[in-house]
Amino acid sequence: MCLFRKKPKDLSVNPFYKEGNHYVVYFRCDRCGEYFRSHLRIGYDFINDYDNPSAPYRIDKVYVGSRCPNKLHLVAAFTAGYKVKTVNLDGGKFVSKEEYEKALHKEEDEK
Ligand SMILES: [Zn+2]
């Protein structure tokens, strides 16, 4: 795989990776360190917020891992062009795609 240097992604501003008609977001449980990956389908997983024309799309999802009962609550608001306006994750932290993939390979190696 070719790794070219890009400006580091600021996950606190925009943790979402666009892949076709999906947004993909990676994060980690604060309590047990389990990694998560979530695919958000444009037009399906986004909630229409008609009362808020400056940010008409929202994400509001709760995730529970397989290792602990901690709930991770992802809330985000998007503009009409699907640009992130605000994003917040309770119970976890956003990680980069690179960190997620590295951690996944490490876990596979340990099995
Ligand atoms: Zn956990």
Image (cartoon, helix red, strand yellow):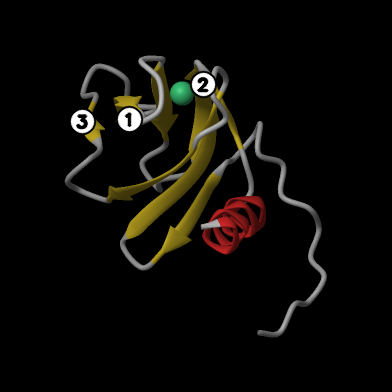
- Camera-near label (1 vs 3) is 1
**Are there few (<14), some (14-19), or many (20+) residues within 10 Å of tag 3?**
some
Amino acid carrying label 3: it is Asn
Q: Secondary structure at mark 1?
A: strand
Q: Quadrant of residue 63?
A: top left
Query: Mark 2 — residue?
Result: 88
Give x and y (percent) for residue 8: 79, 53
**Are there few (<14), some (14-19), or many (20+) residues within 10 Å of tag 1?**
some
The foreground one among 7 and 69 is 69
- Camera-near label (3 vs 2) is 2
Looking at the image, residue 9 sits to the left or right of residue 86; the answer is: right
Above or below residue 40? Residue 98 is below
The foreground one among 77 and 63 is 63
Residue 48: image tag: 3
Question: In the rendered view of the protein, which quadrant contains the N terminus?
Answer: bottom right
Give x and y (percent) for residue 16: 51, 46
Amino acid carrying label 2: it is Asn
Query: Mark 1 — residue?
Result: 59
Calculate the distance from the C-alpha at mark 1 to the C-alpha at mark 2.
Answer: 10 Å
N-terminal-most mark, 1 or 3:
3
N-terminal-most mark, 1 or 2:
1
Q: Which residue is pictured at 58% across the width and 62% down the height?
A: 105
Amino acid carrying label 1: it is Ile
Q: Are marks 1 and 3 in contact (CB under 8 Å)?
A: no
N-terminal-most mark, 3 or 2:
3
Give x and y (percent) for residue 101: 58, 59
Above or below residue 7? Residue 11 is above
Q: Quadrant of residue 30?
A: top right
The foreground one among 52 and 103 is 103
